[in-house]
Amino acid sequence: MEQLFIGGIGASEMLLIVVVLLLLFGGKKLPELMRGAGRGIKEFKDAVNKPIEDDDDKPEANKTTATKE
């Protein structure tokens, strides 16, 4: 059988995985789970690609409280 994906997973294995997921979670819950997983992946990618900001550059971090003497 021809391997379709990296790691040796073929079409029959993918079909088996989909059937098992449908049996475990049902037809209504599965789209919600995939949507949540997609949002999580998107947030992770955004966090990885976001430039690192130094706390020293923020004005709130440089504020000091003055005390009256």
Image (cartoon, rainbow, N blue to C red):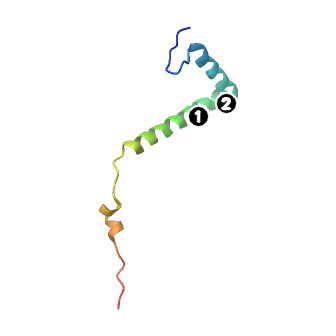
Label number found at residue 33: 1
For image coordinates 53% across by 34% down, the residue present is: 35
Secondary element at image label 1:
helix
**Disc 2 packing (10 Å; few <14; some 14–19; many ≥20):** few
Q: Compared to 7, does 47 lie above or below? A: below
- Which residue in the rendered view is the most extreme toward the bottom? 69
> Residue 49 or 26: which is nearer the viewer?
49
In-image side of 26 versus 66 (left or right):
right
For image coordinates 35% across by 51% down, the residue present is: 52
For image coordinates 34% across by 54% down, the residue present is: 53
Which image quadrant for residue 33? top right
Q: Earlier in the sequence, mark 2 or mark 1?
A: 2
The three-letter amino acid code for the residue at tag 1 is: Leu
**Disc 1 packing (10 Å; few <14; some 14–19; many ≥20):** few
Secondary element at image label 2:
helix
The three-letter amino acid code for the residue at tag 2 is: Phe
Query: In x, y percent, where is residue 18?
Result: 62, 22
Q: Compared to 39, does 60 lie above or below? A: below
CB within 8 Å, label 2 to label 1: yes
Query: In x, y percent, where is residue 51?
Result: 33, 48
- Quadrant for the C terminus in the image: bottom left
Q: Compared to 64, does 15 lie above or below? A: above
Q: Compared to 26, does 1 lie above or below? A: above
Which image quadrant for residue 22? top right
- Which residue in the rendered view is the most extreme toward the front? 7
Query: In x, y percent, where is residue 11?
Result: 56, 14
**Total number of numbered labels?**
2
Which image quadrant for residue 67? bottom left
Work out how far the residue at label 2 is from the one at label 1, CA to CA, in angstroms.
9 Å
Query: In x, y percent, where is residue 34?
Result: 55, 32
In-image side of 38 versus 46 (left or right):
right
Residue that carries the numbered disc 2 in the rendered image: 25
